[in-house]
Every structure is written in C-alpha cells, then in structure tokens.
Image: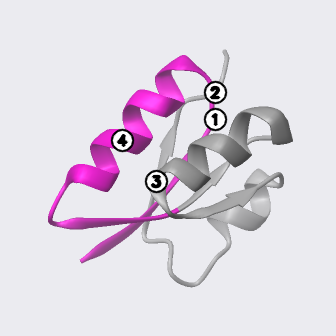
Amino acid sequence: MVGIAVLGAGRIGKIHAASVAANPKATLVAVADPFPDAVEPLAKSLGVEAMNDCMAAISRPDVDAVVIGTPT
C-alpha cells in the first residue's frame, strides 16, 4: 500500500484526492493547503488529516508519494 499526500485543495486537488482515496492500492493519508477553508472540508469528506503546511505533509513518515495540485 502506497501512502499518498495531496497538495492543494482547489478544483484539481479535489479531483486527485478523490481518485487516490478510491484507489485500492493507495492510502490517502493527508491533504495539505494553506487555506483552512479549502482543506478542512475536503479532508473531512475523505476521512483524512487536513494540514496547512505542505512541507510537513510531505515529511510525514507514512507518505511515500505526493500528488501536486497547486497553482502554477
């Protein structure tokens, strides 16, 4: 099982987070976004931790891969 963190809770972050959560070979462990109003509802809906610090999210020991869905 691959532990994945999604960075970004906007439109594309929501799509990627839902895709990871639905994948039987992956575990969505966190969603990170500096805007609490964006990340908290998304993380709650997927049953994962909401984080406001992206560096802390990718530094977690249970994160094996990162999906980046942040603005350019």
What is the quadrant of the N terminus in the image? bottom left
Q: Residue 13 in the image: x percent, y percent?
A: 52, 31
Q: Say which label, 4 or 1, has the lower sequence index.
A: 1
**Distance between the alpha carbons at the discs numbered 4 and 3:** 7 Å
- Label 2: which secondary element: loop
Q: Which region is colored magenta?
A: 1-29
Tell which tag, 3 or 1, sits nearer the viewer. 3
Residue displayed at 62% across by 23% down: 10
What label does residue 18 carry, if any?
4
Q: Say which label, 4 or 3, has the lower sequence index.
A: 4
Q: Say which label, 2 or 1, has the lower sequence index.
A: 1
Residue displayed at 72% across by 47% down: 40
What label does residue 8 carry, if any?
1
Compared with residue 4, is residue 6 higher up or lower down, i.e. above or below? above
Instruction: Tell whether label 1 touches label 2 (CB within 8 Å).
Output: yes
**Distance between the alpha carbons at the discs numbered 2 and 3:** 19 Å
Q: Amino acid at mark 1?
A: Gly
Residue located beneath label 2 in the image = 70
- Label 1: which secondary element: loop
Residue located beneath label 3 in the image = 46
**Distance between the alpha carbons at the discs numbered 3 and 1:** 14 Å
Q: Say which label, 2 or 3, has the lower sequence index.
A: 3
* Residue 7 colored in magenta in the image: yes
Instruction: Tell whether label 3 touches label 4 (CB within 8 Å).
Output: yes
Q: Amino acid at mark 4?
A: Ala
* Residue 18 colored in magenta in the image: yes
Label 1: few (<14), some (14–19) or many (≥20) C-alpha neighbours in 10 Å = many
Label 2: few (<14), some (14–19) or many (≥20) C-alpha neighbours in 10 Å = some
**Distance between the alpha carbons at the discs numbered 2 and 4:** 15 Å
